[in-house]
Amino acid sequence: MKSAIRKVSYYYQTGPFQTCDRCSTAIRHVFVVHYVDGLTEKYGSECINKILSGDTSLKALFNKNAKLLQKYQNSLAALSMPADQMPRGKEYFGSGIYFIADCEGKDVFSTHWFFHPVFDQEKNAAGRHYIVEDAAARMKKCCQEIEEGKAWFAKEIGRLETFLGRVIQKGLLT
């Protein structure tokens, strides 16, 4: 008998396929189940759905929170890049100031949107609104907000991983 589940983490396998520890099929969407005793197993989304098939509300709850976990992981990855490599999102009212985007091109959002620390100085200077007076102060403020955002996303990712573990544990008991 396996011990209780501590958390469930997720990653998308881009290279050679992983195999599911439950059914031995090739998987790209890998859910790593971490047990309290230190054992880890890799499951594919199909096996997770089979485990939760007895209760459709658990399955819906897991899928909704797994998607949120993926979104937060993408956002944290975007915020963790060097400033010059962060993808740009939408422009802020034609000002040459941009939001930070994730790998899917969607603007990163936690409790607020994050401005990209690098902006188009020429376009910004030619605009009428939202002109940057002090580039160094703006860069410092953006970097500070990014660090706060990274901490928030890391905390939320941990919370979601623990929650997904409880959902699967409940699914295994039903």
Image (spheres, grey):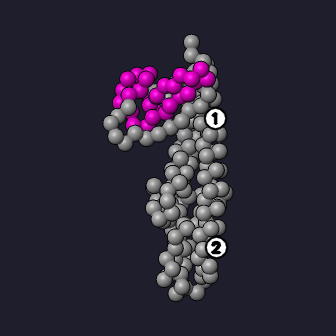
The residue indicated by pointer 1 is 163
Could you say whether the residue bearing mark 2 is in a helix, strand or loop? helix
Q: Residue furthest front?
A: 136
Q: In the picture, which quadrant includes the C terminus?
A: top right
Q: Is residue 72 above or below residue 39?
A: below
Q: Residue at x 59, y 31 (%)?
A: 7
Judging from the image, what secondary structure is the residue with disc 1 in? helix
Mark 2, residues whose alpha carbon is within 10 Å: few (<14), some, or many (≥20)? Answer: few
Asked if 56 appears above or below 22 in the picture, the reply is below
Distance, label 2 to label 1, CA atoms, is 39 Å
Is 147 in front, or is 104?
147
First of labels 2, 1 by sequence position: 2
Looking at the picture, which amino acid does disc 1 mark?
Answer: Phe
Image-based side of 31 in relation to 161, left or right: left
Please provide the residue range marked out in magenta.
19-46
Question: Residue 51 lies in magenta, yes or no?
Answer: no
Label disc, if present, on residue 137 of the rendered structure: 2
Q: Which residue is situated farthest in the top direction here?
A: 1
Q: Amino acid at mark 2?
A: Ala
